[in-house]
Image (tube, rainbow, N blue to C red):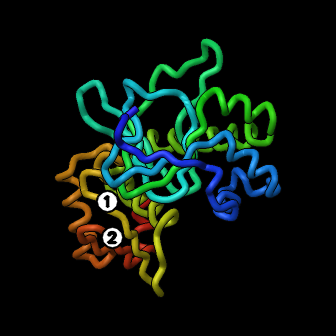
Amino acid sequence: MAKEAYREGQAKDLNLDLLRRIHLFEDFSKEELKNLLKYMHLKTFKRNEYLFFEEEAEPGVYILIEGLIKLLKETHDARIVIVRLVYPGDVFGWIEWGKKTPKNTYTAKAMVESKTLYISNKDFINLSIKYPAIAIKMTCEATATLMHSYETLKSIAGGKVEERIAKVLLEIADRIGKKYEDVIVIDAPLTRLDIAEMTGTTVETTIRVMSKWKKQGIINAERGYIEILKRRELEKLAV
């Protein structure tokens, strides 16, 4: 764990309405939510701070409340790949049971100031025994994430570069984009390097592709934000 990277507080002070907006907890009563919070720790991270590193991460579950997190993996040839972006409401981390431990994990880094709920491995097991619905929902969440990762890997292995970049931009737009008439604005510090690491290509190729789209009026990319001007054109490229 990055020892000084976060500020930790009492999850019990979290607004219950905020907690209920997370789909994992939307069906719980007020009293149940209060009990659930007893198992959680509230942690906040500054921009570019690490939540944990692959080689020293402890098992447990994180739920992103606010912000944007990227999950990183270093390949055998020392390249960095963004395994996935974590958006508000998403769950990440892993649970260990007996000798069932993951062979591969990852590093987590905050892209902007972020707030998370953390449940330790032991507390999550106890929580699941007391509230089986949590375990079921988490299993569904993990399955969806696994399928998404499979589709991403399949795209990287066989898809064209333009297709991969278009799919990533559309996914980000759907998750955190804000629509202003016909323009979708992605207000996040996404660099060309980030997009390259999400699509398994080089920074140079990413710059070339996005510059071409900018000239064609499909997107407008500046430091700190990306505008999707012609979504239908981007969707055609993603097919």
**Quadrant assignment for the N terminus:** top left
- Residue at left offset 81%, top offset 35%: 130
Instruction: Locate residue 8 relative to residue 196 in the image: left or right.
Output: right
Q: Return the residue found at the far top.
A: 99
**Secondary structure state at the residue bearing disc 1:** loop
- Type of amino acid at the residue the image marks with label 1: Leu
Q: Residues within 10 Å of mark 1 (few under 14, many from 20)?
A: some
Percent coordinates x, y for residue 211 in the rendering: 21, 67
- Residue at left offset 44%, top offset 28%: 57
| Mark 2 → mark 1, Cα distance in angstroms | 8 Å
**Secondary structure state at the residue bearing disc 2:** strand
Percent coordinates x, y for residue 197 in the rendering: 31, 45
- Type of amino acid at the residue the image marks with label 2: Ile
* Res 190 label: 1
Q: Earlier in the sequence, mark 2 or mark 1?
A: 1
Q: Is residue 20 above or below residue 101?
A: below
Place residue 192 in its image quadrant: bottom left
Q: Is residue 186 visible?
A: yes
Nearer the observer, 114 or 184: 114
Q: Is residue 137 above or below residue 60?
A: below
Nearer the observer, 221 or 27: 27
Place residue 169 in its image quadrant: bottom left
Percent coordinates x, y for residue 174 in the rendering: 51, 65
According to the picture, the residue beneath numbered tag 2 turns out to be 226
- Residue at left offset 52%, top offset 48%: 9
Q: Is residue 101 above or below residue 90?
A: above
Dots 2, 1 in contact, CB < 8 A: yes
